[in-house]
Image (cartoon, rainbow, N blue to C red):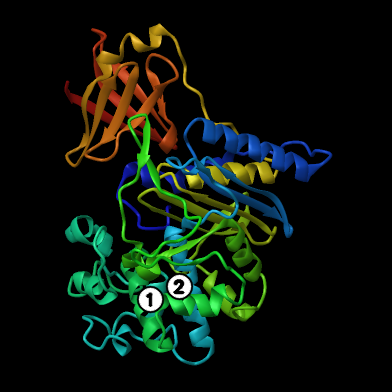
Amino acid sequence: MKGIEMKPSILLVISFIIIKIIAATFIISPPVANASESIQSKADEYMIACQDMNLFSGSVLISKGGKVLLQKGYGMANREQKIENSAKTKFRICSLTKSFTAMAIMPLEEKGKLSVNDKLSKFIPDYPNGDKITIHHLLTNTSGIVDHTELPDFKTIRRTKPVTIEQTIATFKKRPLKFVPGEKFEYSNSNYILLGLISEKVSGKSYGDFIRGNIFVPLKMNNSGFEYYNKLIENFATGYKKSDITIIKADSRVMSNAHASGGLYSTIEDLYLWDRALYTDKLLRKETLNKMFTPFKDVYGYGWCIIDIFDKKVTTHGGDVEGYNTNITRFIDDDVCIIILSNFEHALTGKISMDLAAITFGKEYKLPQKQATGDNIYKNYNDYVGKYQLNPNVTFNITRKGNMLFFQQNDRDKLEILPESETEFFIREADIKVTFVRDSKKRVIQLILHLGDRDLPAQKISK
């Protein structure tokens, strides 16, 4: 599961499945003499490999037992100005914001200013079905409210033009619920937009000011804040994406519109202070923190996913917007924290986090895969070019540019597919494998998309 503004794409939905598969297949490695130095060395080697293959740009922190083992930037914060990423580089943290929003709500409950059982209608009296939806439903993504990022005007207007939180709520307010509140989990950024408005109504402060005064200042997170429209932020990473094989600036985005669902920025250093605070009662009583870290439906608690990896309890969240991809993974019983902030849209931060966890816990892992080479690999590329249909709504386009093949799902970004052999290919950015199938006449008639343990065949329907 990717946390933040989830996109309905097979290539993105698969990340959580991959995490579970990887976690289930790790093999314990023998102990080493100097564990901390070994972790640092192996993690740095892994991240340099990701950087060199254009799979990552950003900053990474690994800590264990209250000791920072790795804290380093990789790649460029600004390619045009040749500014490198560092531990102090600021990034959009995307949906990691939701954990802070939950932390803004819960102290208000401790002070008796609201209850998670309060109805939405208490704060927005004219909200349809507001007497059926509680703050608890919003926090746990079980309200049934449609995700406003899936609505048509989101891409055409609200990505690039500033709007008020009331204008955003108006886009989904009157739409029917997708299910009875509390019935099931379905991730929706709209829930946290509403929580942001509630925090403002109850506290009497803007969301950004409230988070700053109640979380950032007490924890001395001096390089974190709310991204206000057109306000310059020093030492801020520029977002990039891949276009064919070229790295270009990502599409623009007005992050203030994301508000309490994704509008914050931070650094790996500041987020480590956040991690440390979550082991204390600096911000909340222990019983309230436990409430946040208890899943209601599926794996979601209050602004956190709660899962098991290596048979260990993990609290985690990820996020992505144009040009940025983020992840924080906390093995809370082992006091291990992995923070990844990337200014590269296609970075697989979820998989990187799991590989770094494998390194930290002495499990087996693999460095990023390299492609096969040789003229015999490329000579049949024209055979693969064409359109393949998975189902009536999903098609894959395979195109060629010189000695490169590209995979494109519907109208999404093209991703290069790299050869392992003449029939087996892989997509680095999505950790997905592709097999091309020929008939008895040696014609390519099908591709099979391998997603974890699932094989999805798509028939070739045109050149």
The numbered mark, 1 or 2, whose residue comes first in the sequence reads 2
- Asked which quadrant contains residue 272, the reply is bottom right
Q: Secondary structure at mark 2?
A: helix
Kindly check if marks 1 and 2 are in contact, taking CB atoms under 8 A apart as contact: yes
Going 74% across and 58% down the picture, which residue do you hit? Answer: 65
Query: Which residue is the site of mark 2?
Result: 101
Q: Residue at x 37, y 47 (%)?
A: 13
Q: Position of residue 455 (x, y in %)?
A: 36, 33
| Residue closest to the far right | 33
Which mark identifies residue 196? 1
Picture residue at 42% right of the left edge, 70% below the top: 140
Q: Amino acid at mark 1?
A: Gly
Badge 2: residue crowd in 10 Å (few <14, some 14–19, many ≥20) = many
- Element on which disc 1 rests: helix
Q: Amino acid at mark 2?
A: Thr
> Mark 1 to mark 2: distance in Å?
7 Å
Task: Please state which of residues 153 and 432 is positioned toward the viewer in this rendering.
Answer: 153
